[in-house]
């Protein structure tokens, strides 16, 4: 008997109601129903609260990263630029990065730049975006007849102060913003070529019969990075005179000559040497010029333009041939870092038992044993101090040493030799600081000379 087969059939759907409006079953004469709008939960990047935004920015690793993030939109830039308290907190947490080192060329030319070898991509991008070869402004002067011979006189606040004695010019150059370059006529002429004539001129190329001019110094304002001053010191055997330039007035002002008692007093030791001051060093608006006799330092407070004389605290160390630099600690206090051999010590201003402020030994921040462990066997010199960090150099390596933590780091190898090194440290950019006013200069009411 044969097997009966069955074929399964899919049952037909029930007929749709006449009022069904689903796809394929609606009235063809009616438009399709509107689609429901989905609710969006996305937030615009510039709608973050300012407090939350600044807390996030505090966690960025470097100043270069902050600049890149803050310039993403106007609201973010405004949040950073309008908050001095955020600026202070960020600086406390993140020391400004070292972008490289400038050195003066031998003979004619422009300063040479050795970039740092860090791994932070934002820092490397900042270096690539800058004009550290000075190709955009300084080289243009050579076509106008000015010799291409610039040497570094100062470096701070993101600017280099360059001197071209042959052209009678000084220039303030920001490699991160080349368009901000300013060219300023010197208040007096200096002939560097005369320095090669032994006995005929001083180290700056000036005749023995004229006052001695030392290198100018750059005074920057953290609250208004677009403002700056230049301070140029002249001296004779016992007097000093400061000449000050302000970019707000675009003119030089000659302050009165001041007698220095340590040189002018009848009982003061007098060696008859007209060249009694060494090149100056700056610490948070104070400029220090050590005496060549290693016993005193001339100090100018640039906020009041008043001179004082300090006893030189490291006289015995200097007698041993130490390397020393004046700079500022993390809290902006002045300090002296001295190196004898490979031992690094710090001196600070402290009050004694009589309430008199003096230089006192503070701490030893690097011992010879620690230096030997790093392979530093000799030839260590201090280059500069910035924001509590000491920058050291040997013929092979650049180091940073934190005064507070005593932590030393190798930064990058030296690829050239130079007597004068100028570390370039990234500064807080003007685009992230509101204009809180320029330098007030009521004290500059003396004889003035416009720069142009």
Image: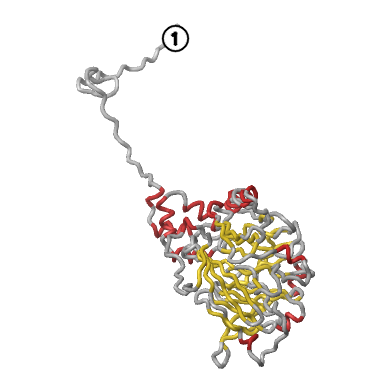
Residue at 67%, 54% (x, y): give it. Answer: 147
Name the residue beneath numbered marker 1: 3
Residue 169 picture quarter: bottom right
User: Relative to residue 25, is residue 195 drawn left or right?
Assistant: right
Q: Identify the image quadrant of residue 263.
A: bottom right
- Asked if 78 appears above or below 445 in the picture, the reply is above
Query: Tell me, what colour scheme is on the image?
Result: secondary structure
Q: Nearer the viewer, residue 7 or 295?
A: 295
Depicted 5 relative to depicted 251: above or below:
above
Taking depth in this image into account, of 225 and 385 the one nearest to the observer is: 225
Does dot 1 land on a helix, a strand or a loop?
loop
Residue 19 or residue 41, whichever sits in front: 41
- 147 and 300: which is toward the camera: 147
What residue lies at 59% left-to-right and 70% top-to-bottom? 232
Q: Position of residue 270 (x, y in %)?
A: 70, 87
110 horizontally vs 448: left or right: right
């Amino acid at each position: 008997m044969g097997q009966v087969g069955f074929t399964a059939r899919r049952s037909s759907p029930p007929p749709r109601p006449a009022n069904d409006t689903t796809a394929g079953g609606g009235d063809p004469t009616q438009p399709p129903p509107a689609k429901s709008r989905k609710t969006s939960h996305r937030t615009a990047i510039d709608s973050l609260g300012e407090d939350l935004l600044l807390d996030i920015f505090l966690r960025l690793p470097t100043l270069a990263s902050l600049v890149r993030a803050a310039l993403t939109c106007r609201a973010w830039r405004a949040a950073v630029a309008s908050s001095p308290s955020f600026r202070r907190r960020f600086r406390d947490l993140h020391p400004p990065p070292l972008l490289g080192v400038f050195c003066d060329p031998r003979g004619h030319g422009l300063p040479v730049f050795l970039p740092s070898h860090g791994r932070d991509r934002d820092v490397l991008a900042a270096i690539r975006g800058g004009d550290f070869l000075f190709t955009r402004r300084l080289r243009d002067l050579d076509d106008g007849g000015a010799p291409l011979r610039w040497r570094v006189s100062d470096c701070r606040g993101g600017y280099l102060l360059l001197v071209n004695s042959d052209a009678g010019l000084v220039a303030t150059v920001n490699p991160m913003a080349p368009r901000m370059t300013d060219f300023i006529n010197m208040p007096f002429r200096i002939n560097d070529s005369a320095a090669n004539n032994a006995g005929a001129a001083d180290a700056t190329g000036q005749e023995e019969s004229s006052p001695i001019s030392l290198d100018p110094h750059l005074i920057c304002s953290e609250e208004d990075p677009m403002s700056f001053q230049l301070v140029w010191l002249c001296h004779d055997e016992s007097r000093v005179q400061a000449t000050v330039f302000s970019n707000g007035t675009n003119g030089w002002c000659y302050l009165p000559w001041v007698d220095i008692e340590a040189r002018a007093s009848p009982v003061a030791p007098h060696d008859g040497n007209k060249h009694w001051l060494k090149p100056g060093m700056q610490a948070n608006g104070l400029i220090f010029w050590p005496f060549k006799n290693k016993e005193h330092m001339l100090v100018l407070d640039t906020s009041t333009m008043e001179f004082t004389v300090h006893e030189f605290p490291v006289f015995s160390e200097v007698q041993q041939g130490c390397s020393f630099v004046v700079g500022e600690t993390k809290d902006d206090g002045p300090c002296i870092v001295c190196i004898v051999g490979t031992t690094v010590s710090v001196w600070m201003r402290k009050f004694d038992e009589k309430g008199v402020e003096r230089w006192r030994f503070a701490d030893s921040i690097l011992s010879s044993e620690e230096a030997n462990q790093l392979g530093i066997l000799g030839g260590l010199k201090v280059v500069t101090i910035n924001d509590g960090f000491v920058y050291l150099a040997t013929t092979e390596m650049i180091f940073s040493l934190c005064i507070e933590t005593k932590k030393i780091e190798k930064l990058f190898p030296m690829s050239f030799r130079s007597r004068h090194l100028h570390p370039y440290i990234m500064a807080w950019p003007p685009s992230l600081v509101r204009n809180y006013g320029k330098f007030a200069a009521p004290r500059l009411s003396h004889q003035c000379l416009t720069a142009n």
